[in-house]
Image: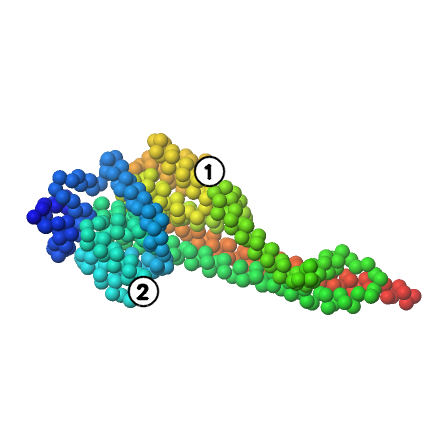
Amino acid sequence: MATFAYKAINGGGAATIEAPDRASAVRELMRRGVTPVSVVPVGAHIEPAEAGGVGSDAAAAGRIDDSAGAFAAAMNLGRGGRVMSRAETATFIRELATALTAGLPLVAALRTMRTQGRSARQMEMLDQIIRDVEQGRSLADACTPWTRTLGELTVNLIHAGEVSGELAEVLTQAADLLDRDLKLRRSITGATLYPLIICLLVVVAVVVVVTFIVPNILKQLAGSAVSLPWPTQVVKSAGELFGGMWWGIAPGWAVISLAVVGCVMLFKKYYSTDEGRLYVDQRLLRAPLLGRLLRDVAVARFTRTLGTLTSAGIPIITALRVTKGTLGNRAMEQVIDDVAEQVTAGRTIAEPMERSGYFPPMLVQIVNLGERSGKLDEMLRQAAKAFEERTEQSVKLFTTALPPLLVVILAGVVGFVVMAILLALLQVQDAAMMGGR
């Protein structure tokens, strides 16, 4: 028999258990209803999980960074692809939080969730997580290979919950955060769907009018010696561009469509580079209407995510690095990189945020006050609701303003085409009247 030291999720300090081997020790602990964070032979070092203190923060940061490294390794192996949608992930985390809050041991909770109509890939994921936990790995380490599905943010929160002994509470916070992010994504999708449909209708209407309707009308003027007005010449050229045969091979609309597809692919390739994404994202933030919407969305995510991470006990440097991935804009991510460097050097968070000009002055003041008072997490969580409401207002403004703007553009284009036809007909009529005299 060997002696193993273990640290349980519900805290209480390190304790020991005797068993033939490590796997047997883990099984015996699970039978007793104890969920261990670590199980090591006596003599190995167990990192204390005390809250507060520079040493504990540094240790926690190291462990979380190790998890990020394990995630990268798993990704290279091709394992852990997305097996659940964002909505399913949020539901999964909330169900696990509810089961743990009800007093179920971790493995029992996972096994119960496995039986609830999951897909084959989801059950495969849960089976692997259960096996890893039964072998003595922490839940965060077991979830690390599946970070593409669960999200780096969720995995780091799970680790913080295990270290602090408040796994159920932290999982509830993670589920709330995922639900808010999902709600925000759905509101943005709903806000942009209608304008996109209108844009498509605008393009289709213009192409149909210019390609099929206008040429038939202008056929009446083919034998006329009257020079056509410039609007008519523009519309006629556009019709020939779309409807004519190019090089005797394909109609113009097909060649133009291929050219558009090629331009989109080139843009995607350019946007995939660091320089291209930074340039495009900077310009998007300066765009009217859209720029404000993107900034408000990023600020709301930043505030809620950073507040949740810091309140869960994750060190500020790690919290900033994780939060950066939720912004969705490279220009603002670069600011967070600068913030992390400043904090590492012992400076404040608020100063580089203010210099960037991307973050609202109210958030900068809140961060500054939170740093001075030592209540950054509390103030961020309180401010998050205000910024989320501001984001909803921006979404409503975008939804309200864009469709009429597109309708005006459509009316302008159609009006230009009608004017071109009428001007030509009037000019031919005037020429006929002059000839009759």
Q: Is residue 204 or residue 410 the one in the foreground? A: 204
Q: Crowdedness of circle 1 by 10 Å Cα count: few (<14), some, many (20+)?
A: some
Question: How far from the left and from the top, in percent, is residue 62?
Answer: 28, 39
Pinpoint residue 309: horizontal percent, then vertical percent. 31, 45
Disc 1 residue type? Ser
Residue 109 x %, y %: 21, 59
Q: How is the image coloured?
A: rainbow
Location of residue 287 in the rendering, given as x and y in whole percent from the top left corner: 54, 47
Which is closer to the viewer, label 2 or label 1?
2
Query: For this view, does 302 lie left or right of residue 267?
Result: left
Drawn side of residue 224 relative to residue 64, left or right: right
Q: Quadrant of the C terminus?
A: bottom right
Secondary structure beneath dot 2 equals loop
Residue drawn at x 35%, y 45% as measured from the top left? 322
Viewer-side residue, 257 vs 414: 257
Residue 235 can be seen in this image: no
The residue that appears at 18% across and 46% down in the rendered structure is 38
Mark 2 lies on residue: 119
The residue at which mark 1 appears reads as 356
Chain-order first, disc 2 or disc 1: 2
Q: 159 or 376, which is in the foreground?
A: 159
Instruction: Report which quarter residue 407 is drawn in.
Output: bottom right
The correct choice, above or below, for 331 with respect to 258 in the image is above
Q: Residue at x 34, y 46 (%)?
A: 72
